[in-house]
Image (tube, rainbow, N blue to C red):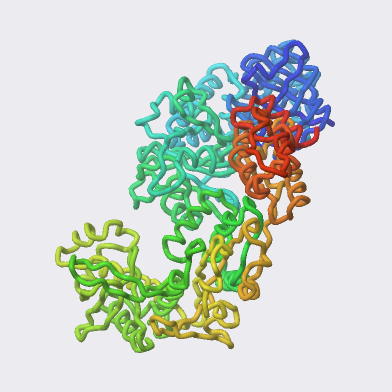
């Protein structure tokens, strides 16, 4: 039996009236996965227009791109009339509204019977009758398959049945239908509708039920004027629950791992009451495409709505903080808003199905977060770790609903997960030709190491935001090696410090390099979680916290080696701990400063009580001076306050008072272009220390004395080093042998398949018209490998962002050809063997006597030599460029 596709059609240019075909073009991945992928040749398709149906057979499927339907029959039929055709079983497809998305009908549809009924205007009607006697009285006026609901002698509604020549009959088993109000009286139905808090729905439903009751009392029957009034009045489970069973328990919504919950606000300032009621009735939410980002987010809220939000995600809708409306589930991609001029003004819409209506008319009065109604956000995701909080503050009190989701992993599981990340390679190098995603992949790898609990199955923007956060916190450090990079830059060196007062001599100090700096950060972080920490129950006020903090600092000082110092991290610098004074004040100094600052308990307490987190302090001088004008060196106070808060956090997590059970925080050092520097010179004697069995804490651990500071130095076991290497610059074999022994190597070859699966043209499987980009890349690389080697191939990234001919021409003009010119040292003969002759033009021979005279040397052969020049590809016509690509592909 054939499937039947149903979809609305608004662009009638897709309909070829001469050949009676519809070319349905839709490259949306989700719809191909969930809908179009179920179709085969000769399946049915019904295209629903404003006042007509286009009904035909599927005759051609271009997977991921289009469907051709032929033998189209036009049937004059409005949307309301379509839902009065018995053969379509409208109760099973209530989603058919003005904005519904394509779907497959759940039952087999007799297409010819449907067409005959529509042409003959055989539409069904929907009735409620006061009794069986009333049915007997009126049955001669009913049409076959009219829907009849009878009120039984107990004044309760029975299930809907079909009128036939034999009387009332149940629906076929294959198309079983049950009304939600079965077993309820009209008065009970009215009271349930009065309990609805969403104003527009409440007024519509209450008025309808009142009219039904009046008509039943006056005439003994009620006829619904549309399918939607019939369906909303009798089938609405979100209002009625399961028939006579009261809807008083909390609705549990199962949130899958890949589903997100959003806040969407449609404020009355931007969207008037008439417009809002329109969107409400149509089950649409709208957000303007230019809605700005919140805070320092890289993604605007308009992009969150249009790109990040996806079909299957949930949201709750509010009108600013005046009304909470519904919890809904997204059923469509973002598209131009259909209401009046909203679309032209930049508004986007998505359709949804209602999961729960608001049951509380009061406004939200709790704490403000970005995702709460009292924040001025428009479209923002609720983080998974905040879902329980949102349940308690919003979903349960306002919607009598809650989201259930997979909670945080157990301690054992988390430790296993952490151990897995620790057991992964400590030192690794990603190597491959240019454009294969080496640097791109270091972001994913470093985030997975530094934050193993982070879900990498998110949008790239979210992964990049997490990477930036970890960079800001110092858990990930990114550097690039170059020819002038030295031991002094990477480990430590003596460098001049500019005097603060003109005329004073230049001071030379030992400054830590990149590697030493991150190792010291790890060391300082772990010092504050040593095994002398008190338990969480032993700290009840600031005095006790400060005493424990001072005790720990004294222990740290006693454990320091000669010439070693302990430092506190500030914003962009570090503050040195000199000593603990007799009154337990903390004597500090800037890392490069000569003067000192005493951080006192009373001032620190004021800062502690003012700010719950160092992240709240964005302007050190201004905000700390607001706490007290007597706070002098704000950088020093901030650094100590930050350390105090970290210490406090470590106490709360140190429940068993056993540092050995505490998970170590992973740190990552990314070295981009590691082979561009002189590795032996940069690492020096420390090349041995990065080996896994030479790390601190290992059985074969090693420490060295640094040449300038004379400090003992070792590499922590939780520092991961990730390098990248461009093989076109220098082969793997040429890399320093000492480094190669201590790193594992992961090849990153070109992957043409990614162009088809993840590139801008993924909806077309990597095709640009008839140009198959993955095959194009593969062809170029095969030729390069023959002429040079595989290390000089070009990467898939050059084609990932191509979405049209302009992009493809730009890729050749600005990336591919310049790279080939570098590879082949301007030898246009070899370049031509790779890309073909149509990308070149010859320079006319304008002077055969160009060479000077020189005895015994014949220059005529050089004068006859053909000179080639690369064409200006950006200015090539599309036909010329297409011809050049065909030449490259030998078509």
Q: Residue at x 71, y 11 (%)?
A: 121
Q: Residue furthest front?
A: 855
The quadrant of the picture occupied by the C terminus is: top right
Position above or below: 458 against 284: below
Q: Position of residue 748 (x, y in %)?
A: 67, 57
Q: Residue furthest left?
A: 630
Q: Residue at x 63, y 27 (%)?
A: 876
- Front residue of this view, candidates 700 and 244: 700
346 relative to 876 in the view: left or right = left
263 relative to 852 in the view: left or right = left
Q: Quadrant of residue 272?
A: top left
Q: How many numbered discs, if any? A: 0
The quadrant of the picture occupied by the N terminus is: top right
Q: Position of residue 775 (x, y in %)?
A: 75, 41
Q: Position of residue 772 (x, y in %)?
A: 73, 37
- Front residue of this view, candidates 855 and 868: 855
- Front residue of this view, candidates 671 and 165: 671
- Front residue of this view, candidates 183 and 436: 436
Residue 692 makes an appearance in the image = yes
Residue 150 makes an appearance in the image = no
Q: Residue at x 60, y 19 (%)?
A: 223
Q: Residue at x 45, y 52 (%)?
A: 390
Q: Position of residue 176 (x, y in %)?
A: 73, 34
């Amino acid at each position: 039996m054939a499937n039947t596709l149903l979809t609305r059609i608004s662009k009638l240019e897709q309909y070829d009236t001469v050949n009676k075909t519809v070319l349905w073009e839709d490259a949306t991945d989700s719809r191909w996965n969930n809908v179009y992928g179920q179709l085969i040749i000769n399946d049915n398709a019904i295209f629903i227009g404003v006042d007509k149906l286009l009904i035909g057979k599927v005759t051609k499927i271009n997977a991921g791109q289009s469907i051709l339907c032929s033998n189209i029959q036009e049937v004059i039929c409005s949307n309301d009339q379509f839902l009065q055709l018995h053969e379509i079983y409208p109760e099973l497809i209530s989603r058919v509204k003005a904005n519904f998305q394509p779907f497959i009908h759940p039952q087999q549809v007799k297409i010819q019977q449907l067409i005959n009924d529509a042409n003959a205007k055989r539409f069904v009607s929907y009735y409620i009758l006061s009794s069986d006697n009333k049915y007997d009285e009126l049955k001669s006026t009913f049409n076959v398959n009219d829907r009849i609901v009878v009120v039984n002698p107990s004044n309760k509604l029975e299930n809907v049945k079909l009128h036939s020549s034999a009387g009332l009959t149940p629906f076929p088993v294959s198309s079983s239908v049950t009304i939600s109000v079965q077993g309820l009286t009209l008065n009970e139905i009215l009271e349930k509708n009065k309990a609805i808090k969403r104003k527009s729905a409440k007024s519509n439903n209450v008025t309808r039920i009142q009219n039904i009751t009046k008509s039943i009392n006056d005439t003994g029957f009620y006829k619904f004027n549309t399918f939607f009034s019939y369906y909303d009045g009798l089938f609405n489970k979100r209002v009625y629950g399961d028939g006579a069973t009261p809807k008083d328990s909390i609705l549990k919504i199962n949130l899958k791992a890949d589903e997100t919950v959003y806040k969407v606000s449609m404020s009355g300032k931007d969207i008037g009451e008439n417009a809002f009621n329109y969107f409400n009735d149509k089950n649409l939410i709208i957000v303007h495409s230019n809605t700005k980002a919140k805070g320092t987010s890289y993604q605007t809220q308009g992009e969150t709505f249009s790109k990040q939000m996806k079909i299957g995600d949930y949201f709750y809708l509010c009108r600013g903080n005046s009304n909470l409306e519904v919890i809904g589930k997204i059923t469509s991609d973002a598209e131009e808003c259909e209401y009046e001029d909203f679309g032209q003004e930049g508004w986007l819409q998505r359709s949804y199905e209602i999961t729960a209506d608001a049951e509380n008319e009061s406004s939200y009065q709790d704490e403000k977060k970005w995702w709460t109604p009292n924040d001025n956000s428009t479209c923002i995701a609720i983080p998974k770790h905040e879902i329980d909080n949102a349940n308690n503050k919003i979903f349960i009190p306002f919607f009598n609903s809650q989201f259930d989701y997979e909670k945080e992993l157990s301690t054992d599981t988390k430790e296993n997960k952490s151990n897995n990340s620790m057991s992964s390679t400590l030192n690794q190098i990603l190597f491959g030709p240019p454009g294969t995603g080496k640097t791109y992949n270091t972001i994913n790898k470093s985030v997975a190491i530094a934050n193993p609990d982070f879900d990498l199955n998110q949008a790239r923007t979210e992964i990049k935001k997490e990477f930036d956060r970890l960079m800001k916190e110092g858990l990930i450090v990114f550097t690039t090696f170059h020819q002038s990079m030295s031991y002094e830059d990477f480990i430590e060196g003596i460098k001049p410090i500019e005097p603060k007062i003109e005329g004073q001599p230049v001071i030379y100090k030992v400054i830590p390099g990149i590697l030493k700096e991150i190792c010291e950060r790890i060391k300082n972080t772990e010092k504050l979680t040593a095994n002398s920490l008190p338990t969480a129950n032993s700290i009840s006020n600031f005095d006790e916290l400060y005493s424990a903090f001072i005790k720990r600092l004294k222990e740290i000082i006693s454990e320091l080696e000669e010439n070693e110092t302990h430092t506190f991290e500030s914003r962009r610098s570090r503050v040195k701990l000199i000593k603990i004074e007799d009154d337990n004040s903390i004597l500090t100094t800037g890392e490069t400063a000569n003067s000192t600052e005493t951080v006192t308990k009373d001032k620190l307490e004021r800062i502690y009580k003012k700010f719950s987190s160092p992240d709240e302090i964005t302007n050190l001088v201004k905000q700390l001076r607001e706490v007290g004008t007597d706070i002098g060196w704000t950088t020093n106070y901030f650094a100590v306050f930050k350390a105090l808060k970290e210490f406090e956090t470590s106490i709360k997590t140190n429940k068993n008072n056993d540092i050995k059970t505490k998970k170590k925080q992973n740190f990552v050092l990314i070295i981009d272009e590691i082979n561009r520097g002189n590795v032996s010179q940069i690492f020096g004697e420390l090349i041995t220390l990065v080996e896994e069995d030479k790390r601190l804490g290992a059985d074969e651990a090693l420490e060295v004395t640094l040449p300038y500071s004379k400090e003992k130095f070792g590499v922590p076991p939780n520092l991961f080093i990730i390098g990248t290497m461009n093989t076109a610059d220098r082969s793997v074999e040429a890399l320093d042998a000492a480094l190669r022994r201590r790193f594992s190597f992961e090849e990153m070859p070109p992957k043409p398949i990614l162009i088809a699966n993840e590139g801008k043209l993924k909806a077309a499987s990597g095709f640009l018209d008839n140009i198959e980009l993955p095959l194009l890349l593969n062809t170029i690389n095969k030729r390069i490998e023959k002429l040079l080697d595989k290390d000089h191939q070009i990467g898939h990234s050059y084609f990932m962002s191509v979405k049209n001919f302009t992009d493809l021409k730009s890729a050749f003009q600005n990336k591919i050809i310049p790279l080939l010119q570098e590879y082949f040292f301007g030898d246009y003969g070899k370049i031509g063997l790779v890309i073909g002759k149509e990308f070149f033009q010859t320079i006319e021979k304008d002077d055969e006597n160009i060479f000077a005279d020189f005895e015994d040397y014949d220059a005529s052969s050089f004068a006859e030599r053909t000179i080639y020049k690369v064409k200006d590809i950006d200015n090539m016509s599309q036909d010329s460029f297409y011809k050049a690509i065909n030449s490259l592909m030998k078509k």
